Amino acid sequence: LVPSTIRLWQLLDKLQGFQIPKYDEAWLKNYIFECQDLMYQAYTEQRPNIPANQLVEVKFEDLVANPSEQMERVYQQLELGEFEKTQPAISGYFEQKKDHKTNPLELEESTRLEIDAHWRGYMEEFGYQAE
């Protein structure tokens, strides 16, 4: 998440910025940590107030591993109706995407340690392990 978000911000600055950004990668990484901390703190505080049939959490890895199973769970939890009617289209979509490869992004050990320090609570809350 961190390397791809850094890449995203750099690309957005390059393509849509009106001036050359005056920050370095270390500042940007810390900004990403702060934003994620604020976002998930607010989310976890407000999550109990959202009715169960209006919220579903899906881990990307689970969706990629079992798209039909995860989408059926989404349909059931959000009470979207008969999954069987949409299942062929959903399966077709994921069949088209089956060969998609994510960008392999390497992390320096120092960045791994920073992620673990900043996002340990997030990782524990959402079932991720520190690498």
Image (cartoon, helix red, strand yellow):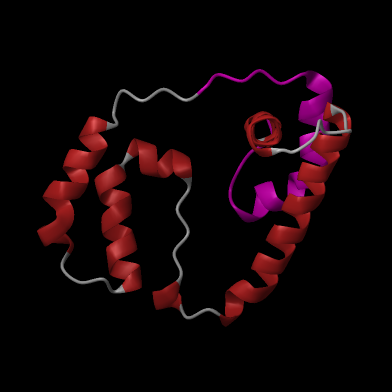
On the image, the x and y values in percent for residue 19 come to 80, 35
Q: Residue at x 61, y 43 (%)?
A: 128
Disc tally is 0
On the image, the x and y values in percent for residue 9 come to 69, 36
Question: Where 49 falls versus 97 (above or below)?
Answer: below
The boundaries of the magenta stretch are 103-131
Q: In which quadrant of the rendered image does the N terminus lie? A: top right
Residue 120 lies in the magenta stretch: yes
| Front-most of residues 115 and 125 | 115
Q: In which quadrant of the rendered image does the C terminus lie? A: top right
Question: Where 119 falls versus 52 (above or below)?
Answer: above
| Picture quadrant of residue 130 | top right
Q: Residue at x 58, y 48 (%)?
A: 127
Q: Residue at x 31, y 41 (%)?
A: 66
| Picture quadrant of residue 84 | bottom left
41 displayed left or right of 55: right
On the image, the x and y values in percent for residue 57 come to 48, 59
30 displayed left or right of 78: right
Residue 63 lies in the magenta stretch: no
Q: Residue at x 46, y 43 (%)?
A: 60
